Each structure stands twice: as structure tokens, then as C-alpha cells.
Image: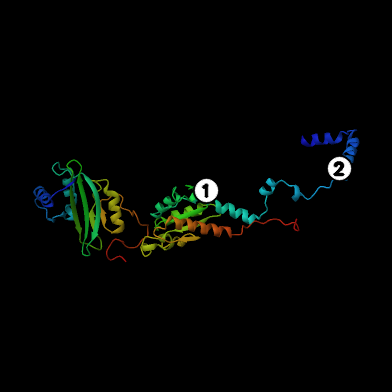
């Protein structure tokens, strides 16, 4: 339908086209005789200059990823209370864009493993990690999560989360203070900022 | 405040009810033989003078040459409590009668003791592992477990 309309418009000949076109060209010639349009930098509005900037894909994607880390609920033991304190109004991790706790691992990027992990619980934690969508990161919060802590020789405790899932940042402490947790999250954000996003951008030469 | 019943008085009651039963008694607890445990527990739960109808806790202790299973009984109506114990001298294959037919709440506690201490509760309807996983070797709460 669209094509038919277009061809109709093109087919109909306007006898005045030649006349209007001539007038337009004459107007342009007259105008250019008096003024030459200067470099856009000299007349572009300040507002536009402030709102348009150039960057790389890597930077933008890393910025988006590190600024909206959504943690999944994985709180097997007592470090969870320190995390709750961190999420509360006094320390307030929502300042860092990661206040939204997700009960579903499919909606989250970050696993803050707050607490002792028993072997009985390990398959479930691994399953939650496997269900998280890429890209995903893990922060081992507390001594138990780093190394098993005082329970590391126990028959029932996993000696560190890195025995079952890859860990990006380790935060020691029993439990770590909220400041430590926030510092660990900031270290993770720095780590994400260094990442190269693997997107293949077609170059002009190949085109 | 819950009143702890005198174990010696309770033992005298049990003795008068079951004259040919041998039982030990300490200041804290009544200790019965494992073959007498169901009859004594039934008496403590159902007789109107004792009325210890609420089983608070079951736990087990390893004393190297015997295991001791500890039952903490409470009476809701009389607000009294009693500690009942039962010893098991066979370390290789320890067995004690189950009390799940009297108290349904004994189910998980007996399974936990079976899992961690290795004491079999005969007559339990579903004696399976509770907190450890299938294939785990040994009984972690025993003193000789390393």
C-alpha cells in the first residue's frame, strides 16, 4: 500500500516544480552572497553541548553494570544481619545503586554470600548461582565465606565459597562492618569498570 | 515457674507401679533400662498423677563406655518437669526403643540422634538421616569422631 501511494505521488507531475525550484535556488544564492555560515561550534546552543558527549561502548556498558548491582538473596547465616544493617537507612547501600534485593536469581547480578555455608546447603547455593544471568559476580562476605572461619575443619562446613563457585571479592571480618562491605562493593565496582566488554563492532573497512 | 519434680519421689512412684523393675535414680534424673523405657514413658505421660504429657527435648550424650539418651518431660496442666534418662551400653550397635508412638514430636529428634550419634530407635516408623547427607561416614557427635 505504501509503495503504491509513493509511486502515485512520484508519477503525478507538478507543472510548477520547475518554477519553485528556480526561486529557491535564487534565494539561496542571494543569501550566500551576503553571509557565510560559520563553524557549528561557534553557534551551537550551550544546552546541546552539555548533553551530548562521545564515549566508548566499553565504558557505557561497564558504567551501567557497575552502577546497578542487584544482589540476590543468599544469606545462610549471621552475616546477613550486618548486610541488613548495611541496607538500612544508617549506611544505606542504595547510594551505590544496589538497594534492590531480588528474591529471584534471574533478576540479579551480584551474590553477596553472607554467612557460613554447610555442605548440606551447598547444592542449593550453587544452583542459585547457576540460575543467575550473565554477567554475574560474587562477593564472599565474612570470614566463613572466605575460608570457612572457625568451622573450616568441621565435618559439615564448606571451607570457603570458592570451593563451589567463583568469588570476585573477599571481605574478611566476623562479621565485617558495614563500611567494609561498602568498601568491598566499591572494589567490585572498580573491577567491573576495568572489564572489556566483548562486543564485535563492525568496522568500515570490513563493511 | 515450672517446678522440677523430685526424681526420687517419681522413682518411688514408678517402683510402686512396676515392682519388679530395676531403675537408678540421681538427684536430677530417673534412669531406666532401655527395655522398660516404653512402659515408664507411657506411665509418666498417661497416668493422671504424673501427667507429663509434653516432651520438650530429646538429646544424647556419649560417655565413652555408654550412651545416655535424655528425655525432658513437662506437664502442661501441673506445670512440672522431669528428666528421664536411658542408657545404652552396646557401642557397636546401640538400640533404644522409640517413643514416636507416644509423642509424635519425638520423630525428628530421634532421627537427629540417629544421624549424629548413631543410636537406632527401634519401632521408629521412618528412621532416616535428618541433617547429614546420604553416604556420610561416621557419627560426628560421638567423642571418638575426628
| Residue A113 position within the rendered picture, expressed as x and y whole percent measured from the top left | 45, 56
Q: CA distance from mark 2 to mark 1?
A: 59 Å
Same chain letter for marks 2 and 1: yes
Indicate the chain on which mark 1 is placed. A
Answer above or below: position of B30 versus A151: above
**The quadrant where residue A172 appears:** bottom left
The answer to whether one can see residue A167 in this image is: no
The answer to whether one can see residue B83 in this image is: yes
Q: Which residue is mark 1?
A: A107
Q: Earlier in the sequence, mark 2 or mark 1?
A: 2
Q: Residue furthest front?
A: A34
**The quadrant where residue B75 appears:** top left
Answer above or below: position of A78 versus A47: below
- What residue do we see at 72% from left, 57% from top? A203
- What residue do we see at 22% from left, 45% from top? B54
Q: Is residue A32 left or right of residue A77?
A: right
| Residue B42 position within the rendered picture, expressed as x and y whole percent measured from the top left | 18, 46
Q: Which mark is residue A31?
A: 2
- Label 1, secondary structure: give it: helix
Indicate the chain on which mark 2 is placed. A
Q: Which mark is residue A41?
A: none
- What residue do we see at 28% from left, 55% from top? B113
Q: Residues within 10 Å of mark 2 (few under 14, many from 20)?
A: few
Label 2 or label 1, whichever lies nearer to me, is 2
Do the CB atoms of the residues marked 2 and 1 lie less than 8 Å apart? no
- What residue do we see at 69% from left, 47% from top? A46
Q: Residues within 10 Å of mark 1 (few under 14, many from 20)?
A: some
Viewer-side residue, A199 vs A62: A62
| Image quadrant where one finds the N terminus of chain A | top right
| Residue A176 position within the rendered picture, expressed as x and y whole percent measured from the top left | 42, 58
| Residue B5 position within the rendered picture, expressed as x and y whole percent measured from the top left | 14, 48
Amino acid at each position: 500500500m505504501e509503495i503504491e501511494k509513493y509511486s502515485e505521488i512520484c508519477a503525478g507531475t507538478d507543472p510548477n516544480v520547475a518554477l519553485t525550484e528556480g526561486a529557491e535556488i535564487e534565494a539561496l544564492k542571494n543569501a550566500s552572497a551576503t553571509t557565510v555560515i560559520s563553524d557549528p561550534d561557534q553557534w551551537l546552543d550551550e544546552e546541546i553541548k552539555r548533553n551530548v558527549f562521545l564515549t566508548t561502548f566499553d565504558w557505557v556498558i561497564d558504567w551501567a553494570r557497575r552502577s546497578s548491582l542487584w544482589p540476590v538473596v543468599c544469606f545462610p547465616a549471621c552475616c546477613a544481619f550486618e548486610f541488613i544493617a548495611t541496607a538500612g537507612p544508617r549506611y544505606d547501600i542504595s547510594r551505590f545503586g544496589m538497594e534492590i534485593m531480588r528474591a529471584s536469581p534471574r533478576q540479579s547480578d551480584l551474590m553477596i554470600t553472607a554467612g557460613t555455608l554447610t555442605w548440606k546447603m551447598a547444592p542449593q547455593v550453587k544452583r542459585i548461582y547457576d540460575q543467575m544471568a550473565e554477567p554475574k559476580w560474587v562477593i564472599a562476605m565474612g570470614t566463613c565465606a572466605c575460608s570457612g572461619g572457625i568451622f573450616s575443619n568441621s565435618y559439615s562446613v564448606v571451607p570457603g565459597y570458592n570451593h563451589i563457585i567463583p568469588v570476585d571479592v573477599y571481605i574478611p571480618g566476623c562479621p565485617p562492618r558495614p563500611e567494609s562491605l561498602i568498601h568491598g562493593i566499591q572494589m567490585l565496582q572498580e573491577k567491573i569498570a576495568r572489564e572489556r566488554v566483548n562486543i564485535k563492532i563492525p568496522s568500515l573497512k570490513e563493511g | 515457674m515450672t517446678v522440677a519434680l523430685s526424681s526420687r519421689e517419681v522413682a518411688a512412684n514408678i517402683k510402686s507401679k512396676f515392682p519388679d523393675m530395676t531403675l537408678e535414680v540421681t538427684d536430677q534424673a530417673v534412669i531406666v533400662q532401655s527395655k522398660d523405657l516404653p512402659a515408664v514413658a507411657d506411665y509418666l505421660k498417661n497416668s493422671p498423677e504424673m501427667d507429663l504429657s509434653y516432651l520438650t527435648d530429646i538429646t544424647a550424650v556419649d560417655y565413652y563406655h555408654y550412651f545416655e539418651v535424655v528425655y525432658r518431660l513437662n506437664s502442661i496442666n501441673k506445670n512440672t518437669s522431669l528428666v528421664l534418662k536411658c542408657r545404652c551400653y552396646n557401642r557397636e550397635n546401640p538400640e533404644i526403643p522409640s517413643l514416636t508412638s507416644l509423642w509424635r514430636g519425638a520423630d525428628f529428634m530421634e532421627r537427629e540422634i540417629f544421624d549424629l550419634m548413631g543410636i537406632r530407635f527401634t519401632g521408629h516408623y521412618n528412621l532416616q538421616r535428618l541433617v547429614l547427607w546420604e553416604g556420610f561416614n561416621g557419627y560426628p557427635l560421638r567423642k571418638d569422631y575426628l
